[in-house]
Amino acid sequence: MNRSARITLYPQALKNNLEQVRLVAPNSKVLAVIKANAYGHGMLEVAKILHHADGYAVACVPEGLELRSSGTQHPILVLQGHQNLQDLKIASEYQLRLVVHDLTQLRYFDLLGKHKVQIALKIDTGMHRLGISPQDAFSLYYKLKNHPNIDPNIWLMTHLACADDLNNSATIQQLGVFTKAIKNINAPLSIPNSAGILGWQASHSDWVRPGIMLYGSSPFAFEKKGRENYKLQAAMTLSAPLISLYQLKKGDSIGYGASYHCPQDMRVGAVACGYADGYPRHAATGAPVSINGIETHTVGRISMDTLIIKLDNIPAKVGDRVELWGENISVDRVAYHAETISYELLCNAGNNCRRD
Ligand SMILES: Cc1ncc(COP(=O)(O)O)c(C=O)c1O
């Protein structure tokens, strides 16, 4: 199937963004978060490009297995940990470090025979997603440390819920809960995601876990602190060709639902990209695009395979490629127009589009 919308990967941008992590958190080791097919960018390809990272984080054991099987010797952290004994056996054999976040995961360790597995104990400090209670951290840490099937070098970690809001004191509270829970334990620590790395120096720990910033997107609201504030570069471009150009009259409607009416005579173009390619259907009229280095925007509803852009006097012809996001148009701006976040757009395009 050869649809003409494409994503293009920029290795140099990925490397630049990793370098920015190093500059901001110089005393930390970096686990590049490449779960969900590296946010749509391609897990194995990104892992190879980012081989200067100190390790990787993936979501689940099958992702970790695929990554390890590609030949990397780096540490691999599995953020959801094991869900059954089979996961545990694979993690032990392939040296995947499993996140232990729920007491039901413990029952499998006794069944591992003579093998050992590496783990990170995750403490829920306020996100209330995954993690054991802070009150249980001390006793559980030592119980696991003394377990014959667990490598005693256990990491301790937590995840920040509100680090993308620089005015929200929840992050300081979470860090306080974490500090208290791990008091008297000497173990490698892992706390921040991209927002923590860029916005909360107090969260920097032995291991940092950047995801979205590696791909060139700001974890903060783009209108306040966009990617350029952090010297991040877009690692992915989504582009598609113009397949038709035409003139409309003032008052003519465009697209499904006839939701847009031309405020004056307009020259527009149809681009061969729609929600089937991962472009957000909810992007409102006005979502930015770039053609031949000139910025313009969408008009009317996004359909499955096509979207319409305003051209007017912009020099353009059928076959010219339109950048839907990438170097010129930050994915954060498109996400804003679609009332979503860049993470979703990148994953969707990655899952739906062919690569150059
Ligand atoms: C536990 C954990 N750590 C780190 C990350 C990376 O987050 P971000 O992409 O915001 O940097 C994620 C992503 O969702 C995560 O779930």
Image: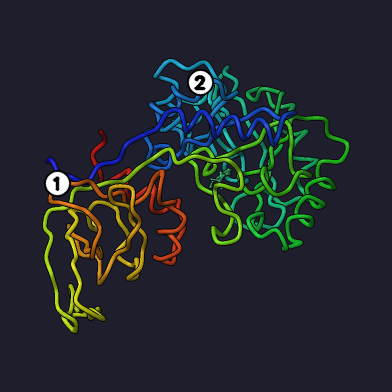
> Callout 2: few (<14), some (14-19), or many (20+) C-alpha neighbours within 10 Å?
some
Quarter, ligand 1: top right
Q: Residue at x 72, y 29 (%)?
A: 26
Q: Amino acid at mark 1?
A: Gly
Answer with the quarter of the image where residue 297 lies: bottom left
Which structural element holds mark 2?
loop
| Above/below status of 261 relative to 44 | below
Image quarter of the C terminus: top left
Answer with the quarter of the image where residue 154 lies: top right
Are the residues tagged 2 and 1 within 8 Å (C-beta)? no
> Callout 1: few (<14), some (14-19), or many (20+) C-alpha neighbours within 10 Å?
few
| Above/below status of 194 relative to 284 | above
Q: Is residue 350 left or right of residue 181?
A: left
| Above/below status of 305 relative to 217 | below
Q: Position of residue 214 (x, y in %)?
A: 52, 37
Disc 2 residue lies near ligand 1 with CB under 8 A: no
Number of numbered tags placed on the structure image: 2
Q: Which mark is residue 51?
A: 2
Question: Which is more N-terminal, label 1 or label 2?
Answer: 2
336 or 319: nearer the viewer: 319
34 or 49: nearer the viewer: 49
341 or 95: nearer the viewer: 341
Q: Position of residue 261 (x, y in %)?
A: 23, 81
Q: Position of residue 262 (x, y in %)?
A: 23, 78
Q: Residue at x 18, y 61 (%)?
A: 269
Q: Position of residue 313 (x, y in %)?
A: 24, 62
Residue bearing mark 1? 319
Q: Amino acid at mark 2?
A: His
